[in-house]
Image (tube, helix red, strand yellow):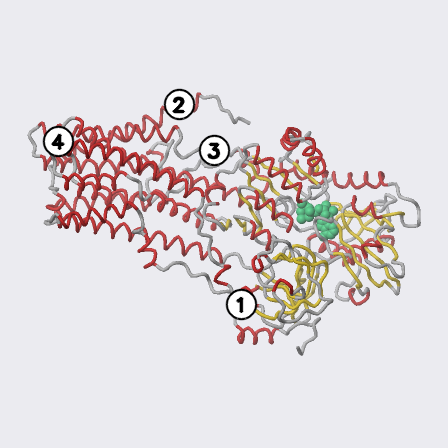
Amino acid sequence: MEQTAAQGLSSAEAKERLQEFGPNQLPEKRGDNPARIFVSQFNSPFIYMLLAAALVSFGLDHTVNGVFILAVLVLNATIGTIQEYSAQRAATALKQMVPQFAAVIRDGETQTVNATELVPGDMVLLVSGDKVPADLALSSVQDLLINESVLTGESNAAIKQVDTPIPADAPLADRSDQAFAGTIVTHGRARGEVIATGLQSQIGRIAADVSAVEHIKPPLLQRIERFTLRVSYSVLAVILLLFVITLFRGADLASVFLLGVALAVSAIPEGLPAAITVALAIGMRRMAKVNVIVRKLVAVESLGSCTYIASDKTGTLTVNEMTAKVVLLPDGRRYRVGGEGMDMHGDILGEGLPPGENDDLEPLILSGLLANEASLVFRDNQWNASGDGVDLAFQVLAAKYGFDLQNYRQTYTELSRIPYESENAYSASTNDVAGELRVHVKGSAEKVLAMCKRLPGGASIDPTAIMTQADQLAGEGYRVLALASGAVSEGTPSLAGCINDLTFQGLVGMIDPLRPEAKDAIARCRDANIKVAMITGDHPQTALALARELRIADTDDKAVTGTQVEKAAAQGEEQLAECVASSSVFARVEPTQKLTIVQRLIDSGHFVAVTGDGVNDAPALRHAHVGIAMGKRGTDVARESAELIITDDNFASILQGIKQGRIVYNNIRKVVFLLISTGAAEITLFILSVLFGFPIPLFPIQLLWLNLVTNGIQDVALAFEPEEGDELKRAPRAPSETIFNRIMVERVLVNAVVMGCLAFIVFAWSLSQGMSEESARNITLLLMVLFENVHVLNSRSETQSVFRQPFFGNPLLLFGMLAAQGIHIAAMYTPGLKDVLQVEPVSLLQWATLLCIALVLIVVSEAHKHINKRKAATRPSTDAG
Ligand code: ADP
Ligand code: MG
């Protein structure tokens, strides 16, 4: 390699190599092609039955029926294919909205690039939480642990070290001096040179295995399929009964068989799973528009049922732009720091001291600068920041004090370092300070204080006094960090061994402004009856101060600490339950304790969404009902463990996601309602006719027509329904609630019975007026088409009046209604088709009469909604507050 490791490649060289080696990415997993999807549409018991029916028709010389059935099949399959294909395309497109980044040294500077731009020879930096972006030959490591289960199947993290040479042909699992693309850094830091990218990498070679999509169906779809199957059995049982009765009455076997099949196809909601997939896919697309990327289709719906959001603080509720505002020396001298964010200018003024008397701050500020991993580089006329927010704040503080950020690394050569890991809550480094070897530590007050023996000048420490200072700063809402340093004696074996004899230097209070939208979003969560809690690694007082401002906590609420949670857990289930329910602010929480809290919430019946960003959040994210990772700031690990990714890291987006989730669930209910109730109506019509000894009210071909012209388009159109507006004002549904709850059953019964009975009355009345059977069926069929179109309008809302729905809110639905009605009218006038369907034009008077009868359905449905609303209003609300 011509460049030195410290310089990395030059941008020009990297560009050239990118041309040569191609982008560092694996070929997009190819979805099924449309032809494949089309064929798969025929893979269902219903379709087999219809195919059998078509064959029977041909065999019996009912060619027209046979052709018609086949036409229905092809049309159904075509609609299904279009839906599935576009859902699949949408899912692939979303994936590309969450790019992976890599820290790389180029032109001698640390840069963040899209991982696809890495080339062999690039020098890559790894931090815990990263997904390794390419195969690397490690050149230096620090406590590096990598989870390589995607490659080796070994779930324990592998320890990496570069001291002993490894033969190049060693099995993957033994190559401790390499890191492989796609594996996950769970701990430590490292640096390594890219040796293979894209398809050349180890994971690239087996890409087919790894990128295979999970073919497990989401639970919601499984439930729906089971439900469909159950409905089908009951429908088949009824049909069998009708079959036997009609046969008994002397009809011929073949035509009764055909009728049975037609009735089955019409009444069985076989389109349900497909329509639900569409509803979920639409929700996915709408969520992407509000910055919520869904990694698993079903999470769309689960987010809607969430009753509890356990949010982390930094970055989700705050903007994660730390600014050091206060420095507090152990003797009580207090300094204020001016300037905000990445502004490098700001005065440091001692309270009650003349300006410029800051010399005593220097050692403290130096500790903050050296026990620090962030980098601030002045390039292209601006400061380019990379690294942790706390670390950056200390760099800015040092710049304000007068340190030279461009050159300090040369002045204070670093010899070793303990990087910040959130489980440690501190970081440390040893540096050469003017010829003397010194160690510097920054971290939480508790942690740092435990390492300290004395105060500057040699006086002994009063830990309680310092903790009081820290509590006070925290109570003012500052994030508090403590600093310490000490000499390193000759021959100390490791850095960890020399951080127990330090001099305490003082405290720094940082602010991290609240996200402007957070407060409003939390208020709206309250309206939607979703509980919000803050779980943080930060100090209880800091957490409480912010929580109060956000109104997550009331003035007299207390924070519960991770230690308290652990103690309660040790005492038993009951104590733990009480402890977790007692507060909505959890502070100084360690990852395992976070998991305990989440588990407890789940046990208590909550549907829990958890947000997280760090390596250690992964277990809680995976464990929650809905894991939510932050797209910008989150680690790769967190993103891989989550179902949802918020691309703008904003708490308010979660709320928007919940709203979309609720819309999707409601729309799914609308589709279910439409399909089940129309099916039930047809069955009712047939049962009545058979019971009262009438001829069959509709021919098989007419039933198929009805099924095709109406349900085919309408059910999918309902999946596109927009919001009703009050989604976020309703309480979340109980996690145990099934789709078929009381209101659904009631509505299906009321609507189906009204449709079925009215249709039967019209059929019977027509016959009694001396109409031919053919004409009576014509009238009945037209009425059913009208009914179903009216019914679509009823289905648009479960609770709200038809007339309150924006009429043009769902153009697809309007189009569907017009198309269905238009096609049927056209059939009445089209020679040929008209004879096949046995339909004919009807008089204006008949039209008017039928339309009036159809509109009765609206009146009934409206009345039912109204009664339900009154009942709901008088029922004592169980979730007030
Ligand atoms: P949060 O839940 O707000 O993200 P963290 O887990 O990031 O909290 O931080 C927990 C504690 O660790 C902080 O209160 C602070 O004392 C300490 N800490 C945070 N970041 C750093 C850092 N970069 N270096 C040293 N200590 C840190
Ligand atoms: Mg953090």
Q: Which quarter of the figure is the N terminus placed in?
A: bottom right
Q: Looking at the rendered structure, which numbered label has been put on residue 249?
A: 4
User: For the residues marked 4 and 3, what is the alpha-carbon distance in whole angstroms?
Assistant: 47 Å
Q: Along the polypeptide, which appears first: circle 1 or circle 2?
A: 1
Front residue of 779/256: it is: 256
User: For the residues marked 2 and 3, what is the alpha-carbon distance in whole angstroms?
Assistant: 25 Å
Image quarter for residue 164? bottom right
Q: Looking at the rendered structure, which numbered label has been put on residue 676?
A: none
The residue wearing badge 1 is 198
Mark whose residue sits in front, 2 or 3: 3
**Residue 64 relative to residue 795: left or right:** left
**Residue 54 relative to residue 874: left or right:** left
**Helix, strand or loop at disc 3?**
loop
Q: Along the polypeptide, which appears first: circle 4 or circle 2?
A: 4
Front residue of 749/61: it is: 61
Q: Amino acid at mark 4?
A: Arg
Image quarter for residue 472? top right
Front residue of 666/154: it is: 154
Q: Looking at the rendered structure, which numbered label has been put on residue 736?
A: 3
Furthest-bottom residue in this view: 2
The residue wearing badge 2 is 870
Furthest-right residue in this view: 458
Circles 4 and 2: CB atoms closer than 8 Å: no
User: For the residues marked 1 and 3, what is the alpha-carbon distance in whole angstroms?
Assistant: 45 Å
User: For the residues marked 1 and 2, what is the alpha-carbon distance in whole angstroms?
Assistant: 63 Å
